Image (cartoon, coloured by chain):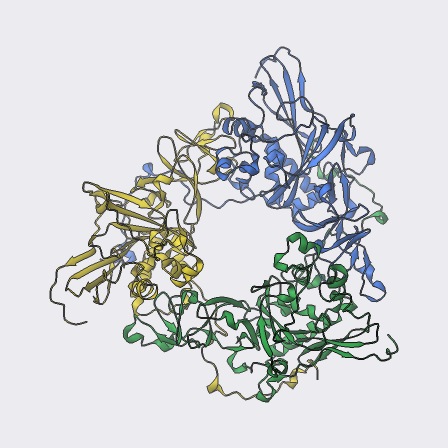
Chain colours: A yellow, B green, C blue
């Protein structure tokens, strides 16, 4: 007998269907992600939504007279500071013949391209065309594409949207009202992911990082039970929790956790996502008081996110939030150590570049995630319909945002009934 | 005169066509490969054929309580072993929110996802959903996609096809019948390619590796005349060969070589490809006896293949098959050394990720290749027509395969007439 | 109030359009490049134009009996020399079963494939098929695709076009007429880009490199004012320039610069692009005399270019052209040093893999570029129309090209009126 059976010779075989393997991966359909909520390039629904807000792009201290490449919302740009101290954010290709302004030189009033010396100010105006007759008679037509930028809280912020929709750059009361010895400082090293010392870019979609804020279950499992007290120690943590409460607020979604210690102390803790990428998480070490740190998850592109944080410190009493990996920073860990004690970086990038929403099976613990996505979808639809999304500020009297909540402790009292 | 000639000014030139270059590469059409025989992803003709058999995926000793990423037939999977010793092979994305189970922790009865602690057994059943009410009321709906696995001969084998077509995992008489002191051992280091010491993945299509078994000419050229006795030495080799004989057998293609030594000894040697990826090659050092090593070319994806071998050894008398590169292993060679003395790795990957079948000019020495491809095509067509391909075993009385052939020597006798 | 506004609730806001940001990057359309002038693969307009000329592919000294991979006009090829000294350039996949001839062995009369030993001569004729009956009865049908090659001026040149259009390989009078002690030497290390010591491939389209020759403004800005006397020192440079003159010539575009020194000396300098990729630039150190170096920008593929130069030297008085980066070669510089003092490499690759022509704003200083592109377009159209492009030579009496111009000095005389 050879392998050249006739097709008509195929024998019949009886199968006991009760004994068959159930739920195997055979025939599994490929998963898909929700592009509406995740993609940020120009012209995409979420990208246009993002382009209605200011975003931090770099530390102010990194924005110097040495030009720097940045990538924000899928766009490559050159960040620099002229010698008068004004920050500038320009399209990288010189409008003349396209050489990157990365090789440009910063002068008092702008940046000069290396190739033929055209000079542009921080608003892209062409100031000089050295080899052209009379320094360039058509200089005005040679506008270098640019974005407005501002320094605030140690960060450079940009607005990349339609000019007629440019809002005010929001401020926060907690950073505006400083007691003696207090100061505001920013970092971009991804401390909450365990990073340390240098600019940190995480290779996953921005939403995977952002929505994690409203996922209290992962703190109990990932950071405590699984990888072992990466944040608060056993002693710092309360021992009894009321059910988590999630609510829509005008500019995002808010979560409130009420917990009790054995000695009767109660702590009310707030977690909050504010459009488009702001995150506030009650201090994980249960240190009392209002929020003193605020995060911003700037989308680099569809599959990368940067995390900037702004913190209020008291000189000599700096409080950081940093995952604890047995004394190492994330950068110092081996792949095997990261596998053995994963943190936010592993759990978020472990979902893939963009998680496959079609494959999720959300549970009751995912209530915050569900609400955040629903609220985000609504805001994107508002932008699509021509409206202004929640949280953009045009009225100068509204420019300062009140930051309430954090870890608010109250003294021992009778425990509430129920739960 | 400028370069702005008018098109009508083009001069006429007389060409002597007899003097023209013939056969240059100008105008050569791009080549194509035969996807029907080579591609292995889910839903492809060959991929579905492959999914009717068991395949080795890793050494049993590498399948531990530390989860491991494997890629088989174009699918990424997580291999692990629970603390009861049961191997498991699961889809990598946790069915809850998609974090990779690479970061999971193995427990007595399954693996627990790092993010929210859902636990799955080796059949994907969800055992726990810690933060959900009552441990998860809808746990049954949260089945993690899985594939059945079995340990055998030092390897973990999986079946990735339709459950109602799952055959028995084949056994081999030579590995079932062990004399005192004999044992069976597996390796994945690509010894036949010259590799040593670690898991070896070769960057070319599986078929390029497999069909090489039925290509006796390359042994004479590549391994002897060209690169110089990479296998048997001059002394070990017979001096006269009868024409090679190829034949279709029920589960593949078989080649028989009959050769003679100067002293009249005759050796009958068998080479054999059995569906879907099994290969048996008579010991290249002409060591007498039946096959003691069997190979399996597991497709990693369309452009990568792993080679597993199972060998029967006698304790203290281990016989390996390993290309000889002047005392070095392939890993230790420089690129220049590999170029100067190429072996199977270079000749197979040198054909490209998937060889371009449209560009081949097959000769009489390629008879085995032609027959193997023809037989393979037939089996794929049988699967497409709803049948069972050759070599799948459903009858337990047929589970043990008889392994005949190898290097069979016979004493001096008169040389046959003819040839 | 929640984020679930009704779409009909969108408020009206009045915008002061005079105060709006102008010219921002928001809404900027993606740029495009001119494929007609830049792409070189087989069948493309520019690729077919390129295939009407001979191109240098490697140093003759690198073409040895050790086969070498080269990539030219987007085609991967194997360059080798048989033991009789004849250079050969063959399609890499052996016409038999496709293994790369990179692993082949050079013999007296050709190259032998490692896998089954088929041997081909430098014109692709199959000389041997060792395991086939009678050495291969159908050898003639097994022609390995090849291209004609010639050694000249220390380079191996190839013609990759239609055989009936194969021109003569051009010669240059300056290299044909050598005084005692003079010799001709070639290099491929990209000296004009600052490279040194090894084969240099620049990651940008060939045209970005070529057209730079007719861009005198960049010399004044990039190499002098910006990065500081990378070529001639202040003392070597004249102090007054007449306007640059550009003109179409029969086989390309020519630029003439007339300049004066303070002592009245006049220097006439010529820069010239000759189809398809030849470049001549007057010695940048203002050393007097005719061209002694000629460059060829061979397209590797659409996004890579190699620069070959042929120079005439006097023994013991070798004159090189090499960018000066404070005593370092380009290879030795750090990324920060390259950013601070960019040269041709940075300005050309800084335009991207293929510059986006749609985004350019050309000025009067770009006259040479504009003319070169226009002339190139014309020649490509001539090839499309079935004609022979400018500069191809079929008449042996025309094979030697007269190389006039360079840095021609004349003694002090009254400065011309005007300008």
Residue B155 versus residue C419 in the image, above or below: below
Q: Position of residue C108 (x, y in %)?
A: 82, 51
Labels in figure, total = 0
Write down the quadrant of residue B395 in the picture: bottom right
Left or right, C149 with respect to A236, comes to right
Q: Nearer the viewer, residue C40 or B243?
A: B243
Residue A14 versus residue B293 in the image, above or below: below
Q: Position of residue B126 (x, y in %)?
A: 38, 75
Image quadrant holding the N terminus of chain B, namely top right
Q: Nearer the viewer, residue A166 or B316?
A: B316
Say if residue A350 shows up in the picture: no
Left or right, B100 with respect to B364, comes to left
Say if residue A375 shows up in the picture: yes
Q: Nearer the viewer, residue A308 or C407?
A: A308
Residue at the right extreme? B417
Residue B317 versus residue A55 in the image, above or below: below
Residue placed at 75% from the left, 58% from the top? C113
Left or right, A30 with respect to C54, comes to left
Residue at the front extreme? B316
Q: Position of residue A361 (x, y in %)?
A: 37, 70
Write down the quadrant of residue A373 in the picture: bottom left
Image quadrant holding the C terminus of chain B, namely bottom right
Q: Position of residue C144 (x, y in %)?
A: 76, 55
Left or right, B407 with respect to B62, comes to right
Write down the quadrant of residue B265 in the picture: bottom right
């Amino acid at each position: 007998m050879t392998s050249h059976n006739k097709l008509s010779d195929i024998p019949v075989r009886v199968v006991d269907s009760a004994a068959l393997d159930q739920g195997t991966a055979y025939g599994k359909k490929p998963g898909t992600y929700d592009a509406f909520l995740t993609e940020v390039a120009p012209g995409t629904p979420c990208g246009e939504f993002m382009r209605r807000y200011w975003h931090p792009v770099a530390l102010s201290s990194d924005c110097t007279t040495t030009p720097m490449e940045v990538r924000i919302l899928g766009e490559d740009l050159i960040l620099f500071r002229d010698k008068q101290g004004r920050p500038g954010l320009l399209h990288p290709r010189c409008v003349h013949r396209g050489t990157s302004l990365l090789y440009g030189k910063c002068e008092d009033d702008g940046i000069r391209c290396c190739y033929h010396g055209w000079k542009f100010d921080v608003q892209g105006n062409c100031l000089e065309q050295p080899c052209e007759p009379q320094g360039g008679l058509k200089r005005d037509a040679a506008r270098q594409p640019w974005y407005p930028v501002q320094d605030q809280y140690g960060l450079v912020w940009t607005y990349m949207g339609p000019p007629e929709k440019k809002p005010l750059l929001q401020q926060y009361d907690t950073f505006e009202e400083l007691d003696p010895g207090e100061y505001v400082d920013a970092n971009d090293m991804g401390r909450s992911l365990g990073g340390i010392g240098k600019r940190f870019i995480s290779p996953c979609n921005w939403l995977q990082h952002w929505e994690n804020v409203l996922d209290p279950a992962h703190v109990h499992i990932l950071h405590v039970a699984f990888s072992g007290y990466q944040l608060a120690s056993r002693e710092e943590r309360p021992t009894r929790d009321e059910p988590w409460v999630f609510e829509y607020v005008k500019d995002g979604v808010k979560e409130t956790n009420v917990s009790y210690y054995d000695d009767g102390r109660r702590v009310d803790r707030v977690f909050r996502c504010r459009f488009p990428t702001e995150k506030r998480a009650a201090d994980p070490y249960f240190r009392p008081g209002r929020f003193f740190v605020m995060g911003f998850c700037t989308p680099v592109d569809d599959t990368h996110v940067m995390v900037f944080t702004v913190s209020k410190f008291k000189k000599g009493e700096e409080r950081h939030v940093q995952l604890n990996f047995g004394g190492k920073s994330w950068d110092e860990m081996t792949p095997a150590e990261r596998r053995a004690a994963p943190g936010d970086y592993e759990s978020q990038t472990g979902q893939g570049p963009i998680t496959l929403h079609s494959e999720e099976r959300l549970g009751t613990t995912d209530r915050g995630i569900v609400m955040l996505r629903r609220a985000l979808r609504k805001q994107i639809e508002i932008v699509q319909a021509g409206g202004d999304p929640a949280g953009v500020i045009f009225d100068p009297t509204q420019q300062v945002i009140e930051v309430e909540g954090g870890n608010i402790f109250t003294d021992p009292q009778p425990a509430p009934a129920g739960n």
